[in-house]
């Protein structure tokens, strides 16, 4: 089963592309959503984080306090690296199990940062980058999250999107119909990189 990594900076439109692919029957692994699920279904993961970081990370209900965790890792590079060393191997294991259960020509792994994480080296058969002008991305995230621009810029600075690893680039700066056409062309066009990759595997 071929794996296509769908990546791009915050506000680029990865989720919109994922939704279009899902409508075409392509399984999409949303790494952010699946990671949140792992925190909920694997209590040992939170315990390990608390031990490694040396701070309590649970709400009064016993769930992961995501706001507290975010405030810690965005302010401390060492803490973020510690978290990644614990969480990313769990995400990789979850993805492989999920991928192996799918029946499709290929699967998509959606993540903004996965290409810069060594634990995922070798997982991708192809990389599709979704991008858009920075000001447009900022405005999208402000409208979506209601966050101040300064917070969004900090989140952008914290991302490591390795654009040089992309096999295919989709520029999402137009209408929804233009994005759909770009997705159809990039993933399903008979001369597209993805289709050529699948033919080589036959």
Image: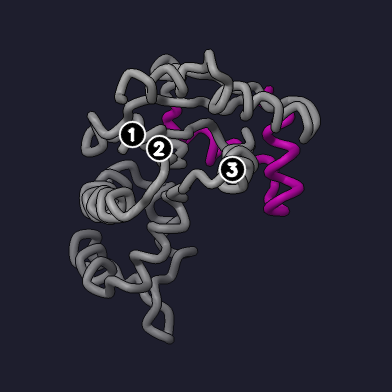
Tell me the residue that label 1 is attached to.
Answer: 2
Write down the region rendered in magenta.
132-161
x and y, in percent, of residue 135 in the image:
72, 27
Which circle marks residue 24 in the picture? 3
x and y, in percent, of residue 136 in the image:
73, 30
Instruction: Report if the CB atoms under discs 2 and 1 are less than 8 Å apart.
Output: yes
Which residue is nearer to you in this view: 149 or 140?
140
- Give the Cα distance between marks 3 and 1: 16 Å
Q: Quick one: SS at disc 3?
A: loop
Classify 10 Å Cα crowding around label 2: few (below 14), some (14-19), many (20 and above): some
Tell me the residue that label 2 is attached to.
Answer: 106
Instruction: Report if the CB atoms under discs 3 and 2 are less than 8 Å apart.
Output: no
Q: Is residue 185 visible?
A: yes
Q: Earlier in the sequence, mark 3 or mark 2?
A: 3
Q: Earlier in the sequence, mark 3 or mark 1?
A: 1
Residue ID at (37%, 76%): 58
In the rendered image of this protein, does residue 97 appear above or below residue 137? below
- Give the Cα distance between marks 3 and 2: 12 Å
Magenta stretch: includes residue 137: yes
Residue ID at (50%, 18%): 168
x and y, in percent, of residue 174 in the image:
78, 26
């Amino acid at each position: 089963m071929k794996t296509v990594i769908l990546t791009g900076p915050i506000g680029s439109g990865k989720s919109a592309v994922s939704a279009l692919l899902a409508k075409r029957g392509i399984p999409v692994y949303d790494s952010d959503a699946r990671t949140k699920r792992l925190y909920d279904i694997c209590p040992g993961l939170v315990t390990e984080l608390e031990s490694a970081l040396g701070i309590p990370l649970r709400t009064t209900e016993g769930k992961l306090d995501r706001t507290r965790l975010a405030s810690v890792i965005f302010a401390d590079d060492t803490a973020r690296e510690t978290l990644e060393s614990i969480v990313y191997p769990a995400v990789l294991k979850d993805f492989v199990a999920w991928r192996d259960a799918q029946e499709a020509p290929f699967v998509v792994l959606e993540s903004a940062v996965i290409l810069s994480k060594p634990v995922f080296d070798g997982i991708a058969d192809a990389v599709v980058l979704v991008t858009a002008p920075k000001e447009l991305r900022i405005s999208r995230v402000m409208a979506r999250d209601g966050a101040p621009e300064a917070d969004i810029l900090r989140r952008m600075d914290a991302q490591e999107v390795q654009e040089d690893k992309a096999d295919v680039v989709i520029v999402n700066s137009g209408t929804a119909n233009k994005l759909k056409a770009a997705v159809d062309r990039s993933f399903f066009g008979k001369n597209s990189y993805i289709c050529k990759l699948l033919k080589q595997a036959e």
